Image: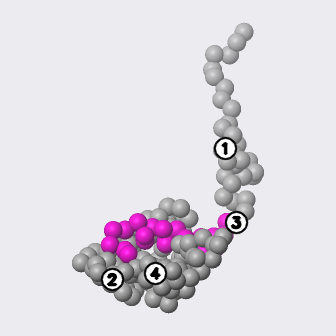
């Protein structure tokens, strides 16, 4: 004789009722994840550069120093230039130094950068972005050469 009532097994990611063991699929309680400041800085730097109207990131000095460093064989361009992050356990705060293109609305560019950075950092890290401070350090005029182009011409 067979039993017509279906017996169900508990799902592997859910504990048995009354069980004191954590569910197998719940890995969140089995360790800690830390995210370095540099990781958040890279994410924010790339997200900020994606916004139309952002010419460059960093202050004049950091852009000059970075351009020289970029010319060293084997070095990679720094995506963290002009970005500073302070990362806590669940929250982060960011400071960005921007150079914007002439003719764009600085307020609109700053708001777009802020939105893009917050979305990217929160999506990728799970951290809550409590603030994104933006400092506009320069405006790139249409007839100005890029700092890197000027240095390249002087070197040749």
Q: Residue at x 28, y 78 (%)?
A: 142
Disc 1 versus disc 3: nearer the observer: 3
The residue sitting at the bottom extreme is 61
Q: Position of residue 33 (x, y in %)?
A: 67, 66
CB under 8 Å between callouts 2 and 3?
no
Q: Position of residue 42 (x, y in %)?
A: 55, 71
**Residue to which mark 4 is pinned:** 153
Q: Position of residue 79 (x, y in %)?
A: 53, 72
**Residue to which mark 3 is pinned:** 32
- How far apart are the alpha carbons under marks 2 and 4? 14 Å
Q: Which residues are magenta?
A: 32-55
N-term mark: 1 or 3: 1
Q: Residues within 10 Å of mark 3 (few under 14, many from 20)?
A: few
**Residue to which mark 1 is pinned:** 13
CB under 8 Å between callouts 2 and 4?
no
- How far apart are the alpha carbons under marks 1 and 3? 20 Å
Q: Residues within 10 Å of mark 2 (few under 14, many from 20)?
A: few
Disc 1 versus disc 2: nearer the observer: 2
């Amino acid at each position: 004789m067979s039993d017509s009532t279906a017996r169900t097994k508990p799902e592997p990611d859910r504990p048995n009722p009354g069980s004191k063991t954590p569910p197998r699929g719940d890995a969140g309680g089995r360790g800690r994840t830390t995210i370095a400041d540099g990781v958040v800085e890279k994410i924010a730097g790339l997200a900020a550069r994606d916004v139309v109207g952002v010419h460059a990131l960093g202050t004049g000095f950091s852009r000059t120093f970075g351009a020289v460093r970029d010319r060293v064989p084997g070095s990679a361009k720094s995506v963290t230039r002009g970005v500073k992050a302070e990362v806590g356990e669940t929250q982060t705060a960011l400071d960005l130094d921007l150079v914007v293109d002439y003719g764009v609305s600085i307020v609109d560019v700053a708001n777009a950068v802020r939105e893009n950075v917050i979305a990217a950092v929160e999506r990728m890290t799970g951290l809550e972005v409590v603030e994104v401070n933006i400092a506009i350090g320069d405006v790139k005029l249409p007839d100005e050469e890029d700092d890197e182009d000027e240095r390249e011409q002087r070197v040749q």
